[in-house]
Image (cartoon, rainbow, N blue to C red):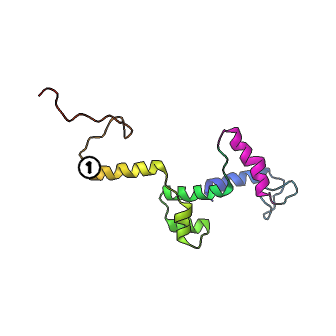
Amino acid sequence: MSSALCKVLESHRITCSHKEPADLVFCTSKGTPLSPKNLYNRALAPAGDSLSLPRVSWHSFRHANATLMGEVGESIKTAQSILGHSDLETTLNTYMHAIPDSQRRAVERVAGVLFPDVPKSEDGPESKEVPSSSNSGS
């Protein structure tokens, strides 16, 4: 977990009634583990609904995490280790996904290498107007 998240959880733990080192950070009022299904139904789904976001499963977070690790340039091997996969292909072919904006950036970067002298449109890559190559005055 990130150091920033660790600090947030440490701050949260100060407000908890269960403060022993072996106690859970998030638990029921009796100190027992939360049920993933109840946590989803009582907290995650309603939070998403209140923000008008689509419902996302816990498993989808694993896919998003793997995809974002690739997006920020981490190695597939690192993602494999964090996700606990024994097979690199599972991480790459099942959990990591292409992000459309990343694909667009990749295409633009390659175009910049192949065609460095082509002027870039002020409207960006979304512009559909193509300048005329004919001269109407001749």
* Left or right placement of residue 133 versus residue 65 in this view: left
Task: Say which residue appears at 71% left-offset and 55% top-offset.
Answer: 10
Q: Is residue 53 above or below residue 138?
A: below
Image position, residue 5 (x, y; %): 65, 54
Task: Say which residue appears at 36% left-offset and 48% top-offset.
Answer: 108
Image position, residue 67 (x, y; %): 54, 57
* Left or right placement of residue 41 versus residue 86 in this view: right
Q: Amino acid at mark 1?
A: Phe
Q: Please indicate, yes or no, whether residue 102 appears anywhere in the rendered image.
A: yes
The residue under label 1 is: 115
Task: Say which residue appears at 49% left-offset and 51% top-offset.
Answer: 99
* 34 falls in the magenta region: yes
Image position, residue 55 (x, y; %): 67, 47
Quadrant in which residue 28 is drawn: bottom right
Q: Secondary structure at mark 1?
A: loop
Image position, residue 127 (x, y; %): 36, 36
Q: Which residues are magenta?
A: 33-53
In the displayed orientation, state which residue is furthest to the bottom. Answer: 86
Quadrant in which residue 79 is drawn: bottom right
In the displayed orientation, state which residue is furthest to the left. Answer: 138
* Left or right placement of residue 50 versus residue 112 in this view: right
Quadrant in which residue 94 is drawn: bottom right
* 30 falls in the magenta region: no
* Quarter of the rendering occupied by the C terminus: top left
For disc 1, the neighbor class at 10 Å (few under 14, some 14 to 19, many from 20) is few
In the displayed orientation, state which residue is furthest to the top. Answer: 137
* Left or right placement of residue 44 versus residue 114 in this view: right
In this rendered view, identify the residue nearer to me: 51 or 77. 51
Task: Say which residue appears at 74% left-offset and 51% top-offset.
Answer: 40
Secondary structure of the magenta portion, mostly?
A: helix
Q: How many marks?
A: 1
